[in-house]
Amino acid sequence: MSGHIVTPTFLQDPSRRELGETPLDFLHSVTGPVVIDVSGRDTSRTRVVSTLIHGNEPSGLFAAHRWLLEGITPVTNMRFIIASVEAALMEPLLTTRFLYGERDLNRCFGRIENAQHEGRDAQRALSIAEAIRAISPDCVVDLHNTSGSGPAFALATVNSQHNRSLASLFCRRLILTDLRLGSLMETDFGCPTITVECGGADDAESHETAYLGIQELAQIDRFREGHHHTLVDVLRHPLRVEVEEQVSLSYHFERDPVADISLRADIEHCNTGITSAGTPLGWLNRGSLDQLKLVDEAGNHVVNRLLRVSGGQIFTVQDVRIFMATTRADIAKSDCLFYVVPLDVIDGAA
């Protein structure tokens, strides 16, 4: 994991020529992570937008590039961070989450204290964190795409009015999480910090969600101003449904006799709305539900509280909200199958 230190390129108020005609033109013009600063009317404050933490999640990049080309002067300084340029440029373009041999960048921010001994991925995380801390920002928004299709939502670790107002610039749902995975959002920058999952990477609506949020963030003086979405609900304590590494996984509309676990090929539909008790999610061909890992915030294994098996088919036990369900088996195995929130931990609009 050794290698030279990852140092971002800094650009101040870049011209259209420097930005290129398209986001990919811009990516091809740089060699690594980039920090773009735009001067605002109030130069005493700066807002940070992080994009492309994962090379296969381009909505933030597309939106930032579109906004930058418009040449509008924001209310405050804006700092855009474009993180995983090298991964994004791997062929096929914008399909590689992180470079082969490296770790998921959004799992490396918990190791930045020893980054010099942790490899290029942790060094990249450290350089991003330092670029944020150096300006004592007003806020940090980290833009992502979900692995599957679904509506946009925000995540935060703190249930504050500022975080809720910031989230409402982009979407209608906020998820409050105690999970500690080493993500950028978990880092304490002394300001409101959220992640926004803009929706699927291939969905035009996701790119528009990111753009409209950036546009709003750049033009309001205070977070409570502007044309917010109404936060319909606040979800607390999402649980990750993970699969053991040795378990084979597939996606089909019927039982796959080859795979240990086969999930519905249309499971992404569960990302929208409520998944009722008794909804079939897939099939278990061998073994038990112990092949799935579902641990609550207290460290208790709770898979049997939320899922059950009947006749080899996997069903929900109670009404839940599912999000970030994907049909990408590689991402599902390296990250998680999906997140789930029981309805009894959902609040009304805040």
Image (cartoon, rainbow, N blue to C red):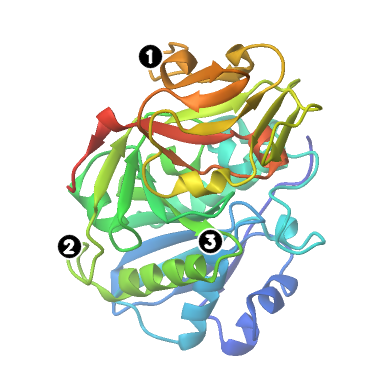
The residue at 55%/33% (across/down) is 281
Q: Quadrant for residue 38, please give it.
A: bottom left
Instruction: Say if residue 182 shows up in the picture.
Output: no
User: Circle 1 sits on which residue?
Assistant: 298
User: Circle 2 sits on which residue?
Assistant: 224
The residue at 51%/49% (across/down) is 269
In the picture shown, does residue 29 fall above or below 196? below
Instruction: Give the amino acid type for the residue marked by disc 1 in the picture.
Output: Ala
Alpha carbon of mark 1 to alpha carbon of mark 2: how far? Answer: 34 Å
Q: Nearer the viewer, residue 319 or 95?
A: 319
Foreground label between 3 and 2: 2
In the picture shown, does residue 123 fall above or below 232? above
In the picture shown, does residue 227 fall above or below 95? below
The percent position of residue 313, horizontal first and vertical second, equals 59, 24
In the picture shown, does residue 5 fall above or below 230? above
Q: Which of 122 and 156 is in front in this view?
A: 156
Secondary structure at numbered mark 3? strand
Instruction: Give the amino acid type for the residue marked by disc 3 in the picture.
Output: Ile
Q: Nearer the viewer, residue 238 or 150?
A: 150
Alpha carbon of mark 3 to alpha carbon of mark 2: how far? Answer: 24 Å
What's the mark number on residue 81? 3
Foreground label between 1 and 2: 1
**Pointer 3 local density, CA inside 10 Å: few below 14, some 14–19, many at least 20:** many
The percent position of residue 216, horizontal first and vertical second, equals 31, 72
